[in-house]
Amino acid sequence: MFSENCGLSKSRVWTILNESGAHPYRSTPVQGLLPRDAERCYTWRNFVMNNLEDHPTFLADIIWTDEACFSRNGMFNRQNVHTWSLENPRYAVNYAGRLMFDDKLNGLVFQEGTLTG
């Protein structure tokens, strides 16, 4: 425990954290990006490109989301894991798989930071 390592009581540690304006943030487990996902992504793109030849409105018939965030591989107990910070420590790896319509197929795209729109 932090209080034992610092030689302070638990109540003193809480007081210091509260006076500094820090807040406990819980982590949210989400899907991790795995090595096999790259092959699945290329398989999906090939499927889409093949369908576009026969059905030009194929992409318009799909409900799309704007982004997917992958973060924290592995399991943890989110009831006991808190990150103390002055600001919410938002972090993630943002992934976007893009299709180009000029007969080019882009690879996997990773973007730093949080996607905002």
Image (tube, helix red, strand yellow):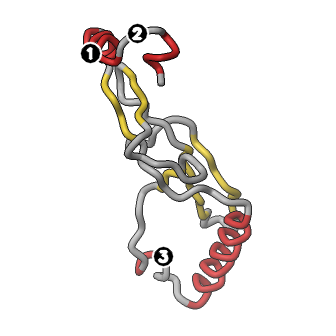
Q: Quadrant of the C terminus?
A: top left
Identify the element where label 1 is drawn.
Answer: helix
Q: Residue at x 59, y 85 (%)?
A: 51
Task: Please state the horizontal and vertical placement of residue 47, each as a whole percent of the image.
Answer: 64, 81
Task: Please state the horizontal and vertical placement of residue 106, each as a whole percent of the image.
Answer: 68, 58
- Residue, disc 3: 59
Q: Residue at x 51, y 49 (%)?
A: 76
Whichever of callouts 2 and 1 sits on the residue coming sooner in the sequence is 2
Which one is in front, 88 or 95?
88
Identify the element where label 3 is drawn.
Answer: helix
Q: Residue at x 72, y 66 (%)?
A: 36
Q: Quadrant of residue 65?
A: bottom left
5 is higher (above) or lower (below) than 79: above
Asked if marks 3 and 2 touch (Cβ < 8 Å), the reply is no
Q: Residues within 10 Å of mark 2 (few under 14, many from 20)?
A: few
In the rendering, which numbered label is found on residue 8? Answer: 2
28 is higher (above) or lower (below) than 66: above
In the rendering, which numbered label is found on residue 80? Answer: none
At label 2, the amino acid type is: Leu
- Residue, disc 1: 18
113 is higher (above) or lower (below) than 29: above
Whichever of callouts 3 and 2 sits on the residue coming sooner in the sequence is 2
Say which of marks 3 and 2 sits in front: 2
Task: Please state the horizontal and vertical placement of residue 102, each as a whole percent of the image.
Answer: 65, 65
Which one is in front, 55 or 81?
81
At label 3, the amino acid type is: Leu
